Amino acid sequence: MPPLLTPSPLSLRSAALAVLAALGAPLTLTAQIGDNADRPGVVQAPLVPAHLIPPSPALSPEEALTSFRVAPGYRLEIAAAEPLVQEPVFAHFGPDGRLWVVEMRGYMPDLDGQGEDLPTGRIVVLRDRDADGRYDESQVFLDQLVLPRALALVDDGVLVGTPPELAFWRDTDGDGRGDAKEIVATDFGVMTDPKRPFLANPERAPNSLLRHTDNWIYTVAYTRKFRRVGGVWETAPTLFRGQWGLSQDDDGRLYHNSNSDHLRVDVIPSDYLKRNPHFPRLPGANVNAAANQFVWPGRVNPGINRGYRRDFLREDGRLKEFTAACGPWVYRGDLLPEFYGNAFVAEPAGNFIRRSTLTAADGTVRAENAHEGGEFITSTDERFRPVNFTTGPDGALYIVDLYRGVLQHRISLTSYLRRQSEDRGLATPLHRGRIYRLVPEGRTSPRVGDVPARPLAAWVDSLSHPNAWWRETAQRLLVESGDRSLVPAIAAIAAGDGPATGRVHALWTLAGLGALDPALARRALRDAAPLVRSAGIRLLESGLSQPAARADLDAVLALLRDPDSFVRLQAALSTGGIDDPAVDAARLAAVLADPTHVHLRSAFLSGIRNREQAMLLGLLESGDTRAVALALVSDLAGGVFVSREPSPIAEIIAAAAQAAPELGASVLAGFAAVANASPRPVVLPNEPSGWAQLAALPAATKPVADLATLLRWSGKPGLDAVAAVPPLTPAQEVRFANGRALFAGICAACHQADGRGLDGVAPPLLDSQWVLGPPERTIRIVLHGVRGPIVVLNHWYTGDMPGLGGLDDHQISSVLTYLRREWGHTASAVEPEDVAAVRAATAGRNDAWTQDELNLIKPAAPATPAAKPAPVASR
C-alpha cells in the first residue's frame, strides 16, 4: 500500500495517554498507533477550519473526470472502472493486449482494519472487445488472496506476490483461471496479522515486480531478484530499494522512491556496490534525483495523517511536501513523444500527479518539476488516489487509481486522521477503482483492443519499436522461447543502424538466449550511441579477467576516457575486481582526471577490495594535493580503518606522517569519518610511528579527538591500560566451534557469513551493540525475536526477527559465544546457565521484543569477581 509515515518506536501507552489528556478526552478512549510518532503532549488540532473543507462524496467515474485539471494539451479518459476493477494497485499489459490488474480489495475495510486478513484480493484480466478504449470484460484469474501486491507475466504463467509468498501460477486447463501453483519464495513480506500490526506492515512489504533489460526480475522492498531459465527459477541477491513502485529508463537505471522522497534512482547497479565490504555504503544506489519535495495540490488537504502540524500544510491548507509519493514511472511510450524519458510520480494523499524532466549528466541523474509551482494533473476529488502507472501497447500512459476515502493504514493512522475520516464519511464506500488513460488533445490516439496473435518471428522487429512496451515484450517472449533459429535475425538488429534502443534490446535478447557472439559486444563498444557502448561493456564484463580477453580489457579501459560520463562509469565498474596493478592504475587515473563526475569514485572504490592500502600508499607517495586526490585519500583511509586491522593502519599512519600535510590531514579525516560506525577499538601494540607528527597538524584537532577512544595503544595518554582479552576456557572453545556451525546453518543466510548483514533484510552483527552489549538482551532476542524499528550502528531497521527459542540452552550459548568472539570481537562468552536464567525469567512471554523493552533490561551484576587480565588470546 502506498506509504505515508512510519511510526517511531516511542512508547505506545505513554504517547496515547499524553495525546488523550491534551485533547481533554476520557482516558477510556483508545488512541491510534500512529500517535506514537509525535512527542507526548502534542495536540492534534485541525489546521483547516471545517467550513473551508469541501464535501468529499464518492463520485461516479464520469463525475470524477470533471474534477481533474490536466496540463494544457492533454486529457484523461476512463479506461476501466468499478465494478470491472476494484481497488487496483498494479496493472500490466500482456502481449495479447489484455490488461492484468492486482486488486487489493481487503485493504483497510474499516478504520480498524478489521477483515484485512480475509482472502478477498484478486488478480483480474481486463479486455476491451470492441476496441473503443474502455474495457468491457473482467475475468478473475486468481482470487482468495490476502492483500496481493505484485505481478509479472513469465513464460506461460503469472508471478504473483502475496505475502509471505511469491508464487508462479499457471492455467493448465484453458479456463482462464490459475490452477497450478509453484512456490518461488516464502519470505516475500509477512502475512497480515491483526494481533501484530508491526509485524505485517503493508506499507513496507515487497511489491512491483519489474522485468529489467538484463533479463532479471527486480522488485521493491526486497533483497533478491529472480529469473526463470529452462523452467527453473533462479535467484540472486540485490540491494533493498524503494517503498512502492519501480521503473527503469532506457539505460536500465532503476527508479523508486519513499513516501516523502519522491524520486530516487540507482545510478550504479546495486550488484557492484555490494562487492567491497570495506565500503558498505558507497553512494550510487538510492540516489536522490529531486532537488526538493515541494508540491502544489489542487485542493486543501486536511485528510493527511499529520494535518494538525504546520510543517505538513501550507497556510492555505494544502499539502506542503510529498508525504505519500509512490509508483514512479519513466514514460517511454510513443503516443506522447514529448514526454519520452520523463518521470511520473503519484501522490495519493495530495490527489495529484507530478511530471518531472530527467537530466543525465556528470554521472548522475537530476529531476525537475516540469510544471514549477504546479502539478501535471491535480484533482479536487479527495478520493482520487493514484498509486501506479503503466504504458500500453498504444503508447498511452495509464494511471491506476485506488479510489477510496481512507488511504492511511492503521499501523500509522493518527487519532486526528481517524476523526477526519469519521466526521466526513471517508471510510465508505469500498470496492471502487479506476484506470485512466492519458492522451493528447487534437491528435489521433489509437485504442487498445485485442492484439492479434503473432508468430514469434514477427516479434523480432518489435525489438526496435519506439514504444518500450513492444521492445520489452518482444525481448521477454524471445528469451523465454529459447528459439535459437531466430538468432541471425536478432543479431542483424544488434549490428544494424536502427534505433539505439533496439540494438540494446537485441544484445540483451541474445544474451538471454545464451547466443551472444562476443564480436557483437565488441562492436557495441564502438557504437555511436552511449547506451549501446555501456551495454557492450556490461556484456563483455564476465570475461575481462581472462588472459585471453586482454584485447577486450584494453578496449574497455580505453572507454575510461569516453566523452560520455555514464560510459566512463560503466567502464570503471566493469573493470573493478580485476586484481591487476595496471588496471588499478588506469582506473585511478580516470578518477583523478574526472573530478566533477559524481559517482566515479564509488565505482573505483567498489572494485579494489583488499587493495585499499596499496592504493592509498601510492597516493601518499605521489604528493598529489588536488581536491580530488585529497577526497580519494580520505575515502581510502576510511576503507583501511573499517578493517580494524592494526598493522595496515599503523603503516598508513607512518606513511601519512611523511607525506604533505594536506594528505596527512586527509588520512586522519578518513579514519575519523568511519571510526564511530563501530564501537570496536583498534588496539595497537604501541604508539604508531608518525602519530605525533600527524596529531600536531593544524587540521588534526577534531579527527584526533574523534579517534581518542577508538585508536588505542598501551600507555596512550588519557586512556587506562588496555586490558588483555581473557582467553576462552576449553568448554567455551567447544561452544565457540559449535556456535560457528549453528550460525552457518541458521543465521548466515540473512546476517551473512561475515556478519555484515543484508541490506533491508537483516542488520549487521559485526560490531553490533546488540551482540556485544549485555548478554541478557541478546539472549532475549534469540529466545523470542525482536520487532523493528530498531537502531543498529546508527541505522534504522524495520521488520521482525523470529525467535529461536526451540534451540536449547547450550545451543543458544554456543551461537552467542561465537558471535561475541568472532570477527575481532572481544566480549565475554555466554554460559548455558545464563540462557537458562533468562528463559525462566521470561517463560510467559510469547511476543517479540521491541527496542524500548530491551533497553530497559539492565545487565546482571557479576556473580564472581572479574578475572585478572590474561595474555591476549587468539580470540
Image: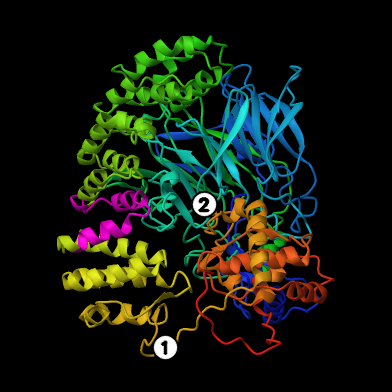
Magenta run includes residue 603: yes
Tell me the crowding category of disc 2: few under 14, some 14 to 19, or many 20 or more residues within 10 angstroms, Cα based: many
Mark sitting on residue 325 = 2
Circle 2: residue type? Ala
Q: Helix, strand or loop at disc 2?
A: loop
Q: Is residue 159 visible?
A: yes
Quarter holding the C terminus? bottom right
Residue that numbered label 1 is attached to: 719
Which segment did they paint magenta?
592-620
Q: Amino acid at mark 1?
A: Leu
**In whole angstroms, how far apart are the C-alphas of marks 2 and 1?**
50 Å
**x and y percentages locating residue 355 in the rendered image:** 42, 44
Between 847 and 612, the one lying in front of the other is 612
Is residue 630 shown above or below 394? below
Which is in the foreground here, disc 2 or disc 1?
1
Residue 524: percent from left, percent from top: 29, 26
Residue 699 in the image: above or below residue 87: below
Crowd rating for badge 1 (residues with CA inside 10 Å; few <14, some 14–19, many 20+): few
Say which quarter of the image contains residue 547. Answer: top left
Q: At x 48% / y 47%, what residue is drawn?
A: 256
Is residue 466 in view from this perspective? no
Residue 509: quadrant of the picture:
top left
In the depicted structure, whether residue 196 falls above or below residue 28: above
For the residue pair 25 and 112, the one nearer the viewer reads as 112
Pinpoint residue 447: horizontal percent, then vertical percent. 52, 21
Q: Can you tell which quarter of the image residue 453 is in?
A: top right
Specify whether residue 624 is painted magenta.
Answer: no
Disc 1 secondary structure class? loop
User: Residue at image x 29%, y 49%?
Assistant: 600
Instruction: Name the outermost residue toward the right.
Output: 844
Q: Position of residue 312 (x, y in %)?
A: 51, 65
Q: Is residue 858 above or below residue 515?
A: below
